[in-house]
Structures are given as structure tokens and as C-alpha cells.
Image (cartoon, rainbow, N blue to C red):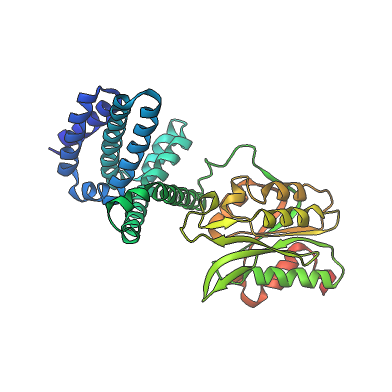
Amino acid sequence: MNRLAGFLLATSVVAVLFGPPLYAVWAAAIAIVAAWILDPPALRAGLRVGAILAIVFAASITAGVVAWAAGPQRGIETGGMVMLRLLVLTVGAAVLVRSVNAETLLRMTRKIGMERLGLVLGLALNSLPRLAEAAADVWTASRVRSDGAVARLRRLPGVGEVLLSHTARIAEEAAAAASLRGHSALTRPGNTLRSPVRVVVVTGPSNSGKTEVVTTVAGQLQSVGVDVVGFVQPGELLEGKKVGFRLRDLASGQEAPLASLSERDDGDFGTRFQFSDGGFRLGREALSRTAPDSVVIIDELGPIELRGQGHMPAVRKALAVADLGGAMIVVRRSLVPSLLAELDASDAVVIDVESEGGRSVDVIIDALGARILVG
């Protein structure tokens, strides 16, 4: 029975993708029945309110665009097909994610020379449950804030933006987790970060004092005449909760707001924060002072930079300067493998401030090769 149900589910996916509208209607019905036979909990998880909302939202947007371009009838037909296709694909994915091991999928695709495809599919499978949970949470929040069905409909565009933000963040975290396990197939070609000197990578968990340690290192180096350039990004707290970041130029001491927590959780670059052009501009100015023999300090590089955005263009120029005295980059633990995959340095060492504890400052200075200057 399970084999027959699996065959029917696979056939339904093919029919809804390539068949006419009548086939698509039958395919959706068959897919739901087949999924119920194979894995009832997976079907219930796949058809949560949040997932249904996302399907309806995508179909409605498609129908509206097509109706505007080709007429109402064509818009309704196209929107209906999109809804049926997404419904069947969601049901199929919900069953697949509980029955297929992502690592097994990756090994299979690697054997045929398609590791990147396998990694993408594996990340998608692992991310689906979290996407469904995020969609349900967003829809619940929208219902709580809306008085009546009309108000909820008016909020749909905003709900869609928040869902896209959650999707981007979940995808980023999934890719970082894959990189942590040694999978670098999704590293962007040509995005290598080159440095002619040793790079000290400083890491640790959130709120472990990375910025404080780096600031102390910069102060000790400056106190003995070392030319320190770059910036730190201290967090801004409100009632113990991090609500933003500022950027401080280590050479001039000048500060500027860099990021603030978005009230609607729909920040820039798929994050929870809205970023300031002034903060990025001050970061560029700080790194533009890089010269031979100077020590470059960058606190910190995040997912935005590892996608080539944010501070990364200025960082790349600074690290390319010849005869640097040293370089230090701060990243969160989950991004260390991604950074190392892109880093082309003469030498690199990773220092975890939580593991080193009170010795962190001395260990970092020693790794930079500057102990003689402060000893």
C-alpha cells in the first residue's frame, strides 16, 4: 500500500507540474490522500495555517499580476494553477522531509557530480519545517493585531514581506550550518577574501565579550605606537535586550549608528535589523586608512558580508594592501567555516574567546605576532 501511495504521490507531482488544469485538480486530491496513507503527521504539518496562507498569498499575487496583464479570466486560471501546484509540492515535500535523509541525498548527488544540487535540496528539506513554523507564527501575530477579516486582508502585503524576511534568515542559517559541517559547495565563486598576512579569526558565542576583547587588543597596540585601523561594532542594549549596533572608528574614535532592531521584524538583507548608510560610510572611511605596517581590525563580518555586501567591498580593499602588520576579523562561530572557505591568507588562526577566557587578549596579540611590541 505504501509503495502504491508513494507512486501516486510522485505521479501527482508530475501531473500538477506538466498537466492541464483538470489533471491538476485530480492530482491535488490524489496527493493529499496518498500523503495521508504514507504519513498522516507529515500531512498535518505540511498543511498548517501558515503554509496554507503562504500558498494563498503566492497564488493571489500571481493571479493579480496576470489579470492586470491578460485579463481577469486568465488571472484566475493562472492563480488557481499556482495554488494547486504549490499545494501538491508542499504536501510532497512534507512527506519527503520526514522520509529522506539529507546527508544520504547529498552523498547520492555527489557520486554523479552534482553536489551543489544535492546540498541545495538537502538545505531545502531541512528548512521546510522551520518555514512552516515561521509562517504559522506570522499569521497568528497578524490575526492578533487585526480586528476582523478586512483588516487581515489589508495586512497581507506586510505579512508577505515578513515571510520573505524569515525565509531569507532561515536559508542563511541553514547554509551556515551546512558550512559548519564542512559543506562548502555553495561558496560564491570569485568571492575569495585575500590577505597577504596572517589573519587572526576571533570568535565565540553571542554576548561572550568578543567586542570588548577586540577593543582591549586595539588599545594595547595603539599604546605602544602600532597603527591600528578598522572598527568595532558595540551592541546597544535596552532592558537587557540587544536592539542595535553602533560602529566605532578605532583610529579616530568617531561613532555612527549602524543598525537598529526592526519593530516589524522585517529588516534589511533578510535580517531583523534596519541598517544605516552612515554606519557603512564610516566603516569605509575607517578601512580606507589602511597602510603598510598597520594592523586591520574588523568587528565583525556577518552573513551580509559573506554574501559580498555590507562592509565586504571595503574589507577586501583593506586586506589587499601590501606589507600589512596584521589583520583580525571577528565572526560568530557558525560562520567560521564559511569565512575560512573564502579566506586566502598567508596564514590564519582561529581563537575562541570563550575557550581562552581571561587569556584572550594575550593570545590574540601573540597570534598577531605583536607581543614584542607590548611585552
Q: Quadrant of the C terminus?
A: bottom right
Query: Which quarter of the picture shows residue 2?
Result: top left
* Residue for point 25% across, 26% down: 15
Which residue is nearer to you in this view: 358 or 302?
302
From this view, report whether residue 152 is shown above or below residue 65.
below
Give the farthest residue toward the left: 1
Query: Residue 238 vs residue 358: left or right?
Result: left
Query: Residue 169 vs residue 371: left or right?
Result: left
Which residue is nearer to you in this view: 165 or 287?
165
* Residue for point 54% across, 58% down: 273
Q: Is residue 174 visible?
A: yes
* Figure disc tally: 0
Query: Which quarter of the picture shows residue 358?
Result: bottom right
- How far across and how far down the image is residue 81, in percent? 28, 30
Query: Residue 86 vs residue 23: left or right?
Result: right
Query: Which quarter of the picture shows residue 188?
Result: top right
Q: Quadrant of the N terminus?
A: top left
- How far across and how far down the image is residue 312, in percent? 67, 49
From this view, report whether residue 373 is shown above or below residue 52.
below
Q: Is residue 204 visible?
A: no
* Residue for point 34% across, 24% down: 71
- How far across and how far down the image is residue 87, in percent? 27, 38
